[in-house]
Image (spheres, rainbow, N blue to C red):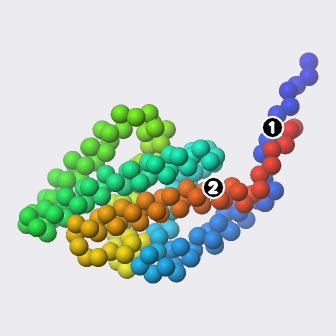
Amino acid sequence: MASKPTEIIVQRVPLWLAVAITVIVSLPFGTLLGKYNLALWASFIAWAEYFALGAKPSALKYIWILFPLGALTMAIFATINNYCVVYAGWDLLTSVAVWIFIWVAIAVYIMRFHPIFQHGSLPYFNGLSMYLALYFGGIGPGSGAGPLTGNPLIDPWILWIWVSLAGIFGGFLGWFNILLTFPKVVKK
């Protein structure tokens, strides 16, 4: 009985070299655009998601939809939190505790309503966490948070756009990284 030929993918450019080239290609987007810089570390997280989801173009659907959606839930949180602290005079810690509890619970509850969340939970949660990382950690000029205005009700949405772009760019980097290996299917 003859064995069935198997197909394997051969990388004509080694992955280590393709990764290094991809990093170099990404650098201008996080270093040379000033207040329009992307948070490349967030892009690199989405790049890793591409590999975690199988390193196939079909992974982009999950990253490009769910990363921004996860960030969206936290943009709503940030808007409400900013309003309560700045305009309603709430204590910062109390406001954060109340509203982050509610919006994280909502973000997780939403997942039960569509099967895309079961396969795409990683980009969804990474969008949520990358938004929070920039919101709480580093939203100065050039940090990757976007061209913030100083308006506490507008800036959460600018941040959402920039976090979403960082995630979308990261998905592209994953796809580009594989493309650079010039993969070839061969029968063995």
Between the residue at mark 1 and the residue at mark 2, the CA separation in whole angstroms equals 21 Å
Q: Write down the quadrant of residue 81 in the picture.
A: bottom left
N-terminal label among 1 and 2: 1
Relative to 145, does residue 4 appear above or below in the rendering? above
Q: Is residue 13 left or right of residue 28?
A: right
Question: Up-down: is 46 above or below 139?
Answer: above
**Total label count?**
2
Q: Residues within 10 Å of mark 2 (few under 14, many from 20)?
A: many
Taking depth in this image into account, of 159 and 187 the one nearest to the observer is 159
Of the pair 156 and 177, the residue shown nearer to us:
156
* Residue 175, label in figure: 2
Which residue is painted at 63% across and 55% down in the image? 175
Q: Position of residue 132 (x, y in %)?
A: 33, 60
The residue at the far top in this view is 1
Q: Is residue 26 left or right of residue 109?
A: right
Q: Tell me the residue at 63%/71% (across/down).
A: 25
Give the residue drawn at x 79%, y 41%. 8
Task: Name the mark on residue 7.
Answer: 1
| Amino acid, disc 2 | Trp
In the depicted structure, whether residue 115 falls above or below residue 46: above
User: In the shown orientation, is residue 63 left or right of residue 101?
Assistant: right
Secondary element type, mark 1: strand
Q: Quadrant of residue 84?
A: bottom left
Nearest the camera: 116 or 126? 116
Please tell me how crowded label 1 is: few (under 14), some (14-19), or many (20+) other residues with Cα within 10 Å: few
- The type of residue carrying mark 1 is Glu
